[in-house]
Image (spheres, grey):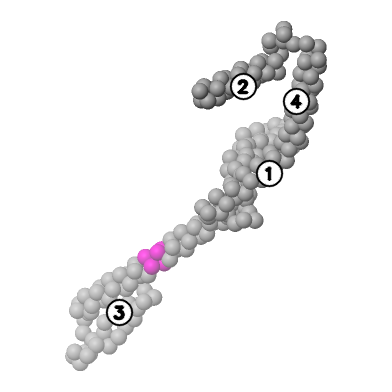
Amino acid sequence: GEDLKEIDSLKDRITKLQLRQMRMLGKDLSNLSLKEVQQLEKQLSESLLSVKAKKDQLLMEQPEHSRRQVLHTEGLTRQIYELRGFHTPSERPKPMYLEYYPIATKVSSATNGTSGSDGGCNSEFDKTYSDVTLHLGLPCDNIRKRKAIERTQKRLIISLYQKSEMELKLEEKKRLVAGMEKISLVMATKVVKPAPEEAKMVMFDDDDEFEECEIDL
């Protein structure tokens, strides 16, 4: 019997709470007296003030929360770059951007085959004519470094070419000297003997000049 009483009391309590909720929502107000309506209005006003105060607090805290969230995001991004080894903590990656350089171009009268009067017009045209080009690439520091590397490579190629050319000339000179020595030996066998003891043979030195030497027979 006690269980049934407890169940009935819980049912009554649930019914009252549901009715109160409906009245707080502005529904089912037909059976209320003036005093009950005033009490309900007071409760709703207090609830509305509490809701407005909470809303103002959230609006005041939102910029601070957003700022903290942005700082936190930047800190995480910096840590990610540091872990990947992209840059040091005090550095930031340099952005890619467009650079443009105005390049003044001159038109000469000699290349166009114009006369003296046309040359005067071209001189005026040279003062006013200019060309603007866009260059897509890295900042100026990286461009200068790249150009310095290219100049170093060109100088190295030129030095290697000159060295190989000198080596070729030296080898050609050696072959020429060896050939002249062979020719001199052949000619020495055909020289007329001036005396039975000795004979003269024509030789070539390194400077391609004739030289006579005595050969004992």
Q: Earlier in the sequence, mark 4 or mark 3?
A: 4
- For the residues labelled 3 and 1, the Cα–Cα distance comes to 98 Å
Q: Earlier in the sequence, mark 3 or mark 2?
A: 2
Q: Would residue 23 appear left or right of 136 to someone viewing this image?
A: right
Dots 3 and 1: beta carbons under 8 Å?
Answer: no
- For the residues labelled 3 and 2, the Cα–Cα distance comes to 139 Å
The residue beneath circle 2 is 13
Q: Where is residue 192 drawn, in percent x and y?
A: 21, 81
145 or 211, which lies in front? 145
147 or 213, which lies in front? 147
Q: Earlier in the sequence, mark 1 or mark 4?
A: 4
The answer, for residue 106, to whether it is visible in the render is: no
- For the residues labelled 1 and 4, the Cα–Cα distance comes to 31 Å
Mark 2 surroundings within 10 Å by alpha-carbon count, few (fewer than 14), some (14 through 19), many (20 or more)? few
Q: Which residues are magenta?
A: 164-169
Q: Would residue 162 appear left or right of 101 to someone viewing this image?
A: left
Q: Earlier in the sequence, mark 2 or mark 1?
A: 2
The residue beneath circle 4 is 47
177 is higher (above) or lower (below) than 26: below
* Dominant secondary-structure state across the stretch colored magenta: helix
| Residue located at (64% from left, 18% from top) | 16
Amino acid marked by disc 1: Arg
Q: Earlier in the sequence, mark 2 or mark 4?
A: 2
Magenta stretch: residue 165 in it?
yes
Magenta stretch: residue 48 in it?
no
Amino acid marked by disc 4: Ser
Quadrant in the rendering for residue 101: top right
Q: Which mark is residue 68?
A: 1
Amino acid marked by disc 3: Met
The answer, for residue 28, to whether it is visible in the render is: yes
Q: Quadrant where the C terminus lies?
A: bottom left
Look at the numbered disc 3 and give the secondary structure of its residue.
Answer: strand
